[in-house]
Image (tube, coloured by chain):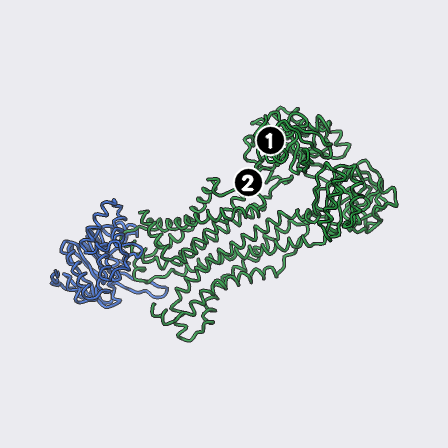
Chain colours: A blue, B green
Amino acid sequence: MIQIKNLKKSFRTEEVETLALNNVNLTVEEGEFVAIMGPSGCGKSTLLNILGMLDNPTEGSYHFGGEEVGKLRENQRTRIRKGNLGFVFQSFNLIDELTVFENVELPLIYLNMKKSEREQKVNAVLERMKIAHREKHFPQQLSGGQQQRVAIARAVVTNAKLILADEPTGNLDSKNGIEVMNLLTELNQEGTTIIMVTHSDRDSHYAHRIINLFDGQIVTESQNKPFEVNA
Amino acid sequence: MFKMYFKIAWRNLIKNKVYSGINIIGLAIGLTAGFLILQYVNFEHSYDKFHSKKNSIYRVVADLDTPSSGKMESSRPACAVPPHMEEEFPEVISAVRFMRLELAVRKDEIKLVEDKAAAADRAFFEMFDFGLLQGDKKSVLQEPYSVVLTQETANRYFGNESAIGKTIRIKDEDINDLPFTVTGIMDEIPENSHIKANMIISMTTYSKGVLPRINDAWGLYDPAAYILVHPNTDPKQLEAKFPDFLERNSGETMRRDKMFVSLFLEPLEDVYLRSERGGEYSGDLGTIYIFSIIAIFILLIACINFVNLTTARSVERAKEVGVRKVIGAEKRQLSLQFVGESIIISLIAFVIASILAALVLPAFNEIAGKVISDGIFTNPINIAYLFLIALSIGAFAGIYPAFVLSSFKPVNVLKGNFSTGTRGIILRKGLVITQFTISITLIIGTIIIYNQMNYMRSQELGFDKEHTVLLPVTVSSAQKELKDNIDNISGVVSTTLASAVPGAYNNSAYSVIQNSQGEGQIANINAYFVDHDFISQFGLKVIAGRGFSRDFVTDSAQGMIINEKAVKFLGYASPKDALGATFSQWGKDGQIIGVIQDFHFKSLQENIQPLTMTMKPDETDLLAIKITGNNIKQTLADIQNKWEAILPNDSFNYQFLDENFDKQYRSQERFGSLFLNFAVLAILISCLGLLGLAAYSMLQRKREIGVRKVLGASVAQVVKLLSTDFLKLVTVAFLIASPLAWYVMNDWLSRFAYRISIEWWMFLLAGTSAIIIALATVSFHALKASLANPVKSLRTE
């Protein structure tokens, strides 16, 4: 699904050039659950952003579904992202002015889906995430765990093939964190590819494969026997 | 999707009530002001456009060229021109003369002076689209002694009864209390017509009655003239035929009088605003331009507020933009969303502005001195205009914030690594400077206009204008008796009979006066016809020779007094040298017996011109009465009693000279007060923007303020720190505004023959006011921020 070769990403300020990623090579197959780990500032999030097509690499190639996407313009990247990719963030990133229902509905609106179809899909995913009873609430009226469930609902409502999760449990207590990880595992078992950036050893054990980054380079890569999903 | 945009916009508005309020109110005030000014500008442009034949109607105007006084541009041709044009040019379908009159009207016991009366030729109602409620437009003005009244005028004399076929008695200089038959009732003439009247008598009253030679009077320049031509007529080709036409009809007269006439055509639509020949009702294109610019400025200030507040608040919207982009929103969709939000805000402002405009419209009409619109909601076009302006502003002001917001990179904003960038800050500062540049320019303008007005009002005019009552007396035979009787009233100091007084219309007389070379100089010169008491009563200073005296019997028949300007005009080195010069004027021959000091017999907008004074009792029609100023009410009652005893059939109408003189400045005063009002509005809107911007700036610097306070900064130091930034902007604006205002106002002042000079203190006053206003606005928030508990601000950060 994903093939990255000799990928480099540097950031330039007026005086300094910082190399965030240096010669990264990575392949992710469909249906995989990959965890990216490493200390702060090692380039995890930069890599996730490039994988999520939110940013372009400075050098190297990035093939997504066989297509080179590393040099696309913003609008072209947006079109590929739409419906194919879902994002889950540490700070949830829900839109405060929209209700739970409206937040989840948003990606479908951008896909120009009909209203009746949207309603059906949103209701189904909210039921599945066990948050349907809160559909008229605004994000600030929910607990952290509930907000992250809404964020996951929003990421999967389009039947995304790939979910990119950036520290999805970072702002949650352990009980809610486990719930979120179970949800992601469930989605993965149903065929969704998941790439997750995490600091948490416990969370990384939900993944099939763990990639360790250090100073912008992949230093180790290990296969993992994932946790069973808690019922 | 649009529903969603609306929802988001609405929820954002509600969430940030204060800033939304500032934004919407600022925009609503701007819209109201801009809309009213545009209504005014539009109204001024609408003059005479309602006539269906407007493209084929022309006003005939004349240039009069005399060897001495050069070319004079007149808005009226000779009386004989229109009927002869109708007869001699196949291109001309009809010609109409329109002569403004002031008529004394009587019906039984009702006696009134109608100052909006006129005489017009038969085709008047066919040429122009002035409607008739009763009567046939082809014939209402056909017969002599016919009169057409507006309904309101008819009601004054006939109450609710039908006026058609009934008679009223009319009197003026030429018509001696004659009965006129009401042949028609006309609609009120619209405000946006340069032709105005509420009573029109037939021109045949003169041509077939009291002035039978009027149709061949090539030397009488009284009525305005209009011709209706066939649709395909080229006005230039028609104009080319005028020299032959004049030569044929009045060549000899022109050569005899040494007054050479040229005729021109002005399209009807251009008469009010574009003609430089004026006329009774004419607009000022310069004023229209100034107000159009002010309207654009005010709308610009409101737009700037919107752009500034929205981009300043972009930090708050950044996360939303990031999220939307991540889940699939394209830049175009986001831009649309933000422009849409901007339009929603402007449409809310539109609703408020409609109500505001409806509320202030009567006051605006009052200031403008005319009914520009009788109601915002009476005409759907008004609302459509306002709606379109609001919509355009919404779209225009939303474009930049939409561009900024939709350009945010999701990677950055979602990580919180986000700033609006120095470019955004520079732009915001630039916009604040623009707003204050406009505001300070308007303040300087207001100060200069008011000083000029004060200067004109307080300027030494060279004559005594206080406590003088003016009585028009058209009945020559009664003038002497009236003067003698009124002289005896205890509250009356003196009286004088004259053809004109300062501030009122005066005749120009064709004159031949001996100049310094000993030659007879021909001139069309300002002429006052007065009696023995005029010079002393008005406190005019005789600087050479003497005034008219009863001791010299020849004075009344042969004496002339001139002013200093006339001395210069005739080429004499000193006033004394002009004494004894011979003259010939309006059938009178004699000598100059005295020279008076120049006085302002016209407004201070005009230079003092040469003036002659002679005694000609048959030309006087004004009695100027100097009263003591004690118990004015009783004195006026006494004067009225005398009037009614001598002229029982004439209505008693008086005016005060000073009020009459100051009327000349009315349009300038209106201009001044409109300018002041809009300057205040511009500053108010700018301050609203500054208030919002300051609030946001304080919010962004909360942590910095907290740290500074922890490190020992006092409240005063923090307020100073926060206010200085804004004051710098106002100072820069002041530096830009000063030369700009100087240039514009110097140009405005050049319209006045007597004007103030622009002083440094005017700029200082404007700059200080702007700084004080800005400081007051900003320091409210600065003080609030500096008084906040630093622990709280640091913790929340």
Residue under label 1: B161
Residue at 74% in and 37% down: B648
Callout 2: helix, strand or loop?
helix
Residue B529 located left or right of residue B414: right
Residue B788 located left or right of residue B588: left
Pick whichever, B5 or B504, lies toward us.
Answer: B504
Pick whichever, B313 or B322, lies toward us.
Answer: B313
| Residue B548 numbered tag | none
Residue under label 2: B45
Callout 1: helix, strand or loop?
loop
Q: Is residue B415 visible?
A: yes
Q: Gap in Å between the C-alphas at discs 2 and 1?
A: 38 Å
Mark 1, Cα crowd under 10 Å, few <14 / some 14-19 / many 20+, is: few
Residue A49 located left or right of residue B577: left
Pick whichever, A223 or B90, lies toward us.
Answer: B90
Residue at 48% in and 55% down: B685
Three-letter code, disc 2: His
Q: Are the residues at dot 2 and dot 1 in contact (C-beta closer than 8 Å)?
A: no
The quarter of the picture where the C terminus of chain B appears is bottom left
Percent position (x, y) of residue B397? 42, 51
| Residue B728 position (above or below residue B152) | below
Q: Earlier in the sequence, mark 2 or mark 1?
A: 2
